[in-house]
Image (cartoon, rainbow, N blue to C red):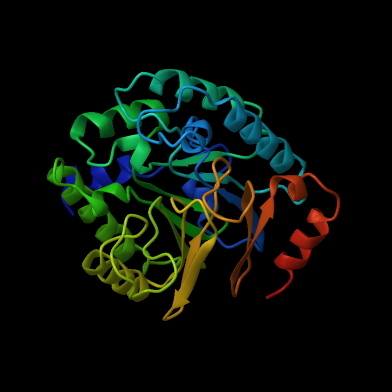
Amino acid sequence: MADTEEMFLRAKHRTFSGLTEEAERQWTGPFCFVQAADPQLGLMKAWRIGDAVGGGDEWEEEVALTKQAVAGVNQLRPRPRFMVLCGDLVHAMPGTEFREAQERDLKEALRETDPSIPLVFVSGNHDLDQVPTPSTVEQYCRAWGDDYFSFWVGGVLCLVLNSQLYFNASACPQQKEAQETWLEAQLSRASSEPKPKHILVFQHIPLYVKSHDEQDEYFNLPQETRQNLMERFKRAGVTAVFSGHYHRNAGGCHDGLDMVVTSAIGCQLGDDTHGVRLVAVTANAVVHRYYSLEQLGQRGVDEELRKMLQAC
């Protein structure tokens, strides 16, 4: 491999406190993590008044919910190895009036997360714009880190993708090509020793919401793109894809690939309530359950989590 390509691959590998690749490539036993999505500061009021495009001038509710989620996660025992936020961190699009203030307030709300629980950020359509540009991708990266990258934890390879490049990359084709090159290299390297116990993918837009062959819509990836990714993930041995975007719990399993769609910390568009998903990773399976924020702060969750870790 050329030196420049090797440097590119390294640049897209992230290390977090306690999650260095050298220490984390070996399987060391079951562990858990938290998957959350769509805090989307500013959407709740905008949705209520019917102005989800031009609204978004208040976000105290989402800040309070995010702080509630952080407090609940901090109490979990066993302690999660990390918490991943699967996109739409804020509602204001790049370059709009409330963007800077929403990002500032979200970071402040997340600041109370226990330092031993690394935060992993995934880019969403509101973080990059519906049609991302090189400029909006750069802005996101300055605020939150790389828009796609990999990391290892406990013998598991985690891949974070910029799903907006699969939804509409018409204004930034070079960025899409770069992610494709990187992803193919990551999936190929996953077959090298030591092989990961599992490969997990995190992205904002789901491959599909309910069925692998459903029609194209706002909440899923286009069919051609979807099938291409699913085939590649299956060949590489990916266990599960985790996403948000739908603001409801959904998903399914096709050909052994689990598609997990998790509802929002913030605005709910269905019958679910504000919450997060607890994920238990064992040698043989990845099992998960969605908890409301109220449930997360109650006694008994720790015991349920321990049972999940012993289930398979």
Q: Where does residue 200 sit, x and y in percent of width and height? A: 46, 61
The residue that appears at 59% across and 75% down in the rendered structure is: 284
Outermost residue toward the bottom in this view:
255
Q: Nearer the viewer, residue 237 or 299?
A: 299
Q: Where does residue 219 sit, x and y in percent of width and height? A: 37, 56
Q: Where does residue 162 sit, x and y in percent of width and height? A: 32, 47
Quarter of the rendering occupied by the N terminus: bottom left
Q: Is residue 258 visible?
A: yes
Q: Nearer the viewer, residue 238 or 258?
A: 258
On screen, residue 73 versus residue 251, left or right, reads right
Placement of 89 over or under 275, stated as above or below: above
- Residue 54 quadrant: top left
Q: Where does residue 18 sit, x and y in percent of width and height? A: 58, 41
State how many labels appear: 0
Q: Nearer the viewer, residue 307 or 102?
A: 102
- Residue 227 quadrant: bottom left
The residue that appears at 25% across and 53% down in the rendered structure is: 167
Outermost residue toward the front in this view:
49
Placement of 97 over or under 208, stated as above or below: above
Q: Is residue 115 visible?
A: no
The residue that appears at 21% across and 29% down in the rendered structure is: 135
- Residue 265 quadrant: top right
Quarter of the rendering occupied by the C terminus: bottom right
Outermost residue toward the right in this view:
299
On screen, residue 107 versus residue 189, left or right, reads right
On screen, residue 227 versus residue 102, left or right, reads left
On screen, residue 188 versus residue 156, left or right, reads left
